[in-house]
Image: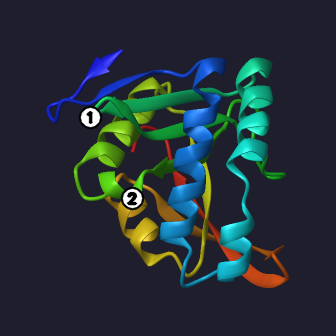
Amino acid sequence: MVQTDNDVVIRSAGVTDAANIARVHVISWKGAYASILPAAYLESVDPAQRAAKWERLLADGRRTTLVAEGDGRLLGFASYGPSRDEDADDGDLELYAIYLDPEAWGRGVARDLMRTVLAEVPDGVPMTLWVLAQNERAHHFYRRHGFQRDGVERMDDIADTPVTEVRFRRDLGA
């Protein structure tokens, strides 16, 4: 458990956190992707279905998920584990998700979560992440934490909307 300067506690997530992680996941998507994804799709994302998915993910133990709590509630989360990239070496890590309740944006909570994640990454272990090409706010955040675009892109389709994801990489104790 980590107590931050802004009265936020960061701790490991458990299965009992699934519903609150799902709530943050959904409202963060609605805030972050409102100008990128169709409004009807964002409104259709079901927190209960997302909670069931998070219960499975948290129970399987293949990833590390941290939550940030403050103001008497869950403000955000970060999840990482073995890289799923086809060009990854054994032991490479991937940041699968980092999302905050939009009410916590700009308060340093994401910074504290990212610093905690990076402190847990062993020296010399690269970490990658994927982010929508249009999400400049996230690009800036990741660059501030030592991640750089590495030139790898992939196309995806979310709600019949083609999107480009770009990969960021943080190498060897950057």
Residue 20: quarter of image: top right
Q: Name which residue type carries label 2.
A: Pro
Q: Which mark is residue 102?
A: 2
Against 159, residue 61 (above or below) is above
Q: Position of residue 44 (x, y in %)?
A: 74, 66
Horizontally, residue 50 falls left or right of residue 34, namely right
Residue 159: quarter of image: bottom right
Give the residue displayed 38% in from the left and 38% down from the top: 113
Dot 1 or dot 2, earlier in sequence? 1
Number of numbered markers:
2
Q: Which mark is residue 71?
A: 1
As measured in the structure, the alpha-carbon distance from the residue carrying label 1 to the one carrying label 2 is 14 Å
Horizontally, residue 10 falls left or right of residue 89, namely left
Q: Position of residue 112 (x, y in %)?
A: 30, 38
Give the residue displayed 31% in from the left and 46% down from the top: 111
Give the residue displayed 31% in from the left and 29% down from the top: 72
Tag 1's secondary structure? loop
Against 92, residue 159 (above or below) is below
How many C-alpha atoms fall within 10 Å of the one at disc 1: few (<14), some, or many (≥20)? few
Toward the top, the furthest residue is 1
Q: Is residue 152 visible?
A: no
Horizontally, residue 72 falls left or right of residue 80, namely left
Tag 2's secondary structure? helix
